[in-house]
Amino acid sequence: MVRCLFGEKCNWYIPVCGRMNCPVSQCSYYSLRLIGCQLSLIQNSMPSFAAGPAQLPKEVVERIQLELPAFEDSGVSILSLTHRSTHFTNLLNRTIRDLRDICRIPSNYEILLLPAGGAGQFDAVPLNLMRLNGDSNQLKTDYLVTGLWSQQAAKHAAKYGQVRILPDPPIEKFIRFPKRDEYEVSADSAYLYYCSNETINGVEAHDDVDLGMDKVVVADTSSNFCTRPFAVSKHGVMFACVQKNLGVAGLTVVIVRNDLLTFSHPFCPSVLNYRCQKEHNSVFNTPPTFNIYVLNLVLQWMRSQGGLEEMFKRSIAKSSAVYAVIDDSKGFYINPVSVESRSHVNVPFRLRNTELEKTFLSSAKSVGLTDLGGHRTVGGLRASLYNGLTMEEAQRLVEFMKSFQEAYDK
């Protein structure tokens, strides 16, 4: 038996690798090597600074590789484990419990694990909350538009009724998150929607939007969920697609207050209907079983590393190191976001000489730093520093940025 890769904080053991029942320590099929009492897979992967799907913690990748042939004692790979099995039901319930514990989600909130990604919630949110306006089938709501993703969400919601864009007038070029006294929520608004971190624009709300109990607040936390603590009780609905900090693409965590489960429009698809999915424990249809399994592994990894507080510390440390290079570059590197709204997880930047940006990307890749290009809609450069990216890897980027400036700042 080989101790878990997560170390002494976890009592999980690997008995066999699943191939011909050979002992893991002797299995050449996986190109394994033992280091002390721990097992490690030989990897040649480069750090990825992609905005998503993002890099998983290496310990999680190794454990996936080890467990893939057979999940626990089921004798079946997680890839083909039926969602109606006891093994999967236990995994699902354990994952929801871990989310509630690690993220401090109050007992009066339901945790749903749904398909269709964050974009699916652009329609799910208005369809599930439309009747907060009464029996009207016309939505009336307010959207804080602070970047391209909240802008997209507002466009989707506008299909169902009246959407008021806040702040009014808007903040030009999405360079900061608005202060509370810069916008006023409509009296007849069903809810206020905001995006806690704009991955494209690099704008983050470092404090939760708080309207008290009189108004429902909805937050898209897709890119900074589990990088910092959130006050869940200040929100009616929170959602996060997991491919940034919690797993692989194809799964969305939705957190919804119990009293908001009865306001959906009759035409809301069952697969996106919060009440329907709650009644079926997120298994109304076949759920993305592998994605839920990976989410559970990431949550275990987070707990072994010190939980939300440790993730928050690391997030601040990584982003601070990158911003320091930008700020000390005397304009060679440029970040357009106001300092108080700079994202801890997505750092967009340009070069003073934009013609050098392709050279920057190719040079970075040549030294093993990948996926540093900006979003296709805005161009430029971007470093995404999610939980799976280590401080050492962020420091490699910092050193590269310094050396690149030395070579090209003529």
Image (cartoon, helix red, strand yellow):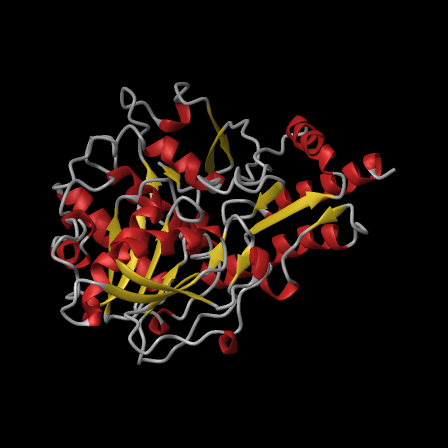
In-image side of 368 versus 141 (left or right): right
Vertical side of 367 occupied by 198: above or below = below
Q: Quadrant of residue 265?
A: bottom left
Residue 253, position as x, y percentages in the image: 31, 53
Number of marks: 0
Quarter occupied by the C terminus? top right
Q: Residue at x 29, y 47 (%)?
A: 120
Quarter holding the N terminus?
A: top left
Where is residue 313? Give x, y as percent.
Answer: 56, 61
Q: Is 10 or 102 nearer to us in this picture?
A: 102
Residue nearest the viewer, comparing 301 with 135: 135
x and y percentages locating residue 192 in the rendered image: 36, 68
Q: Is residue 116 above or below residue 28?
A: below
Q: Position of residue 249 (x, y in %)?
A: 36, 40
Visible residue check, residue 273: yes
Q: Nearer the viewer, residue 150 or 110?
A: 150
For residue 181, side relative to residue 153 (left or right): right
Write the residue at 78% across / 45% down: 332
Image height check: is 339 above or below 253? Answer: below
- Farthest right residue? 410
Q: Is residue 26 left or right of residue 203?
A: left
Q: Look at the picture and state if 255 lies above or below 395.
A: below
Q: What residue is shown at x 52% (from left), y 40% (from top)?
A: 377
Residue 253 shows up from this direction: no
